[in-house]
Image: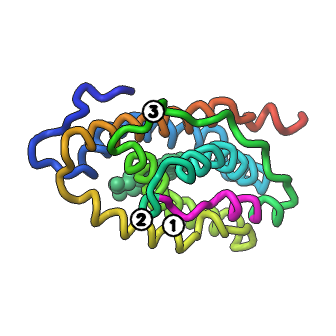
Amino acid sequence: MASANHMGMPGESLRTHLRAATMAAHDLLDHAMQAANGWQTREDYARFLSLQHAARAPLEAWLAAHAPAGLVPPPQTGLIARDLAQLGMPAPAPAPLFTIGRPAPGSALGVAWVLAGSALGNKAIAKQVARIGGGAWPVAFLGDDGAMAFWQDLRARIEGPAAPTEAEGATRAAEAVFSHFLAAAEHAPTHEESVPA
Ligand code: HEM
């Protein structure tokens, strides 16, 4: 999944560069999450939320330790735990630690971009959940206005070109976050494994 060019094209916005570098990983993740969660039952939705909680908990811890205040998206694991509790499920244990070694210029921006950008996908998923769940499933996480507001602020910051070292650090970090999510998705129980025959 490593991009061939971490530096980007001259004049390219950081956002365009990050999206291009992680497009394949995003497609894989989208596919893995849809495959693991058929979106038919409350249990399917709860599995999706559990995966999100497990993957995000160590990322939120990483951001709290390494990112400057403006690059810390509002934590969402509390919202996910609330949704899981309303569905009658316990919050899952955190996934293994997330680490990218010594933080470099752009690292925090890359991690923040992936988590903030995921609010776009969450908005689309929230519509699906409202339809499938007949409006009865809790959506504190998917409908989080705080995440969308953070995303709008971050957009302004990434819609121009970045210094090459910052672009490189952000890209490496974003790729690492997608790998971390993919690993969590691959280890999530499938429908067949979690529901007795
Ligand atoms: C079922 C899973 C997912 C679906 C259906 C989905 C869907 C989407 C959609 C519709 C967009 C907007 C695309 C566009 O504007 O062209 C998007 C963007 C994005 N998503 Fe996802 N997504 C999913 C999972 C994730 C996850 C788990 C993450 C990361 C943790 C993520 C990170 C992002 C990022 C970083 C962007 C791009 C933001 C930007 O435009 O700068 N997505 N996703």
Tag 2: amino acid: Trp
Quadrant hosting residue 87: bottom right
Per the model, the C-alpha gap separating discs 2 and 1 is 6 Å
> Is 175 placed left or right of 49 in the picture?
left
Please report contact status of discs 2 and 1: CB closer than 8 Å, yes or no: yes
Tag 1: amino acid: Ala
Quadrant hosting residue 26: top left
Q: Where residue 33 sits: x, y (%)?
A: 59, 42
Badge 3 element: loop
Per the model, the C-alpha gap separating discs 3 and 2 is 25 Å
| Sooner in the amino-acid sequence: mark 3 or mark 2 | 3
Which of the two residues, 98 or 136, is positioned nearer the viewer here?
A: 98
Which of the two residues, 157 or 124, is positioned nearer the viewer here?
A: 157
Quadrant containing the N terminus in the rendered view: top left
The number of numbered discs placed on residues in the rendered structure image is: 3
**Residue under label 2:** 151
Q: Where residue 136 sits: x, y (%)?
A: 75, 72
Q: Mark 3 Cα within 10 Å, few/some/many (few <14, many 20+)? A: few
Which of the two residues, 114 or 192, is positioned nearer the viewer here?
A: 114
> Is 130 placed left or right of 65 in the picture?
right
Residue depicted at 79% across the width and 46% down the height: 92
Q: Mark 2 Cα within 10 Å, few/some/many (few <14, many 20+)? A: many
Badge 1 element: helix
Please report contact status of discs 3 and 1: CB closer than 8 Å, yes or no: no
**Residue stretch in magenta:** 72-82
Q: Nearer the viewer, mark 3 or mark 1?
A: 3
Which mark is drawn over residue 147?
1
Q: Nearer the viewer, mark 3 or mark 2?
A: 3
Q: Does mark 2's beta carbon lie closer than 8 Å to ligand 1?
A: yes
- Residue 116 vs 59, above or below: the answer is below
Which mark is drawn over residue 102?
3
